[in-house]
Structures are given as C-alpha cells and as structure tokens.
Image (spheres, rainbow, N blue to C red):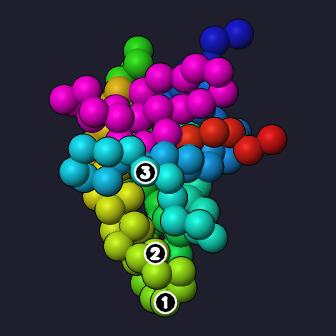
Amino acid sequence: QPIEPPVGGAGVDPALTDKTWTLISLFDGAGAMVSPIAGTQITANFTADGTLAGSAGCNDYTGSASTVAGTISISTAAATRKFCAEPAGIMDQEALYLALLPTASSYALENGQLTLTAGNGQPVAIYVAAQ
C-alpha cells in the first residue's frame, strides 16, 4: 500500500519519520565537523506531512522539510526565544545549527546515521536515531 504524499507537499521519506534524530556532528562553518558541546542535545523529528521540529540545544524549533529521491529541502520557520547561559557556546552553536539546516540539499541514511549535505558536497549535520 503506497503512502500518498499530502496534497501540495512532497512529503518526507518514511525512513526519516517517527524517529528522534540526535545530532552527533555539525559543520563548524570553517571546514571541520565538530561534536556538539558536551551537555547539549540537538534533535530533529520529521513527520510524514513535512513538519520538522526539534531542540536546537537551548530552544525548540519548527520548520518544514520535504524529500525527493535523496534530495531534501528544509526551511526553519521559528524557534523559541529562551537564552541559555550554560554550557559556554550553546547559543552560538544553536544559531549555527539553525543556519545550516536550510543549506542542506541532500541526505543519506547509512548504518543508522542520517547525514545532511549541502549543495557543495559538504556534510552539515550528522544524526543518529534514538532507540
């Protein structure tokens, strides 16, 4: 029984939905992949109808996502406006993460890891699915 995408939207690959993806590696904007700051947790949850939501480490964010044949389009709409003082750097990390998400143009699932990659081939975020 094929799953029909919602009218007006491309929908999201079922392999991405109904899981909480936890960030394990993030592009630092300058050429390296770095682990999230100790004590922070960044998550992403995709729904079949194209909603993306999660925690950016301090604030919760929502947006939309659609996937087609290995490509992904993400728009981050809104984040709550809390300020977190600890751990050091958490707000910069959050701003970076939220800026990187819309740059993703393709995704790959391998060995339980989800990698989002920008158009230039640079991975921008790598997640694992929480069990």
Q: Which residue is mark 3?
A: 34
Residue 46 can be seen in this image? no
Q: Quarter-wise, where is residue 32 in the image?
A: top left
Find residue 41 and report its horizontal and vertical position in percent: 60, 63
Q: Which residues are magenta?
A: 107-126
Q: CA distance from mark 3 to mark 1?
A: 20 Å
| Distance Cα–Cα, label 3 vs label 2 | 13 Å
In the rendered structure, the answer to whether residue 1 lies left or right of residue 86 reads right
Callouts 1 and 2 close, C-beta under 8 Å = yes
What secondary structure prevails in the magenta region? strand
Residue drawn at the location 80% of the way across and 41% of the way down: 131
- Determine whether 124 is above or below 39 in the image: above
Q: Nearer the viewer, residue 14 or 105?
A: 105
Q: Which mark is residue 40?
A: none
**Residue 9 location in percent, x, y?**
40, 34
Apparent side of residue 69 relative to residue 105 in the rendered image (left or right): right
From the viewer's perspective, is 6 left or right of 1?
A: left
Q: Which residue, given by chain and number where applicable, does mark 1 sit on?
A: 85
Residue 45 image offset from top left, x and y in percent: 59, 48
Question: Which numbered dot is residue 90?
Answer: 2
Asked whether disc 3 touches disc 1, contact meaning CB atoms under 8 Å apart, the reply is no
Circle 2: residue type: Ile
Residue at horizontal 50 percent and vertical 53 percent from the top: 35
**Depth check, front residue: 130 or 87:** 87
Q: Residues within 10 Å of mark 2 (few under 14, many from 20)?
A: many
Amino acid on which disc 1 is placed? Ala
In the image, farthest residue toward the top: 1
Amino acid type of disc 3? Val
- Mark 3 or 1, nearer chain start: 3
Front disc: 3 or 2: 3
Pick whichever of labels 3 and 2 is earlier in the sequence. Answer: 3
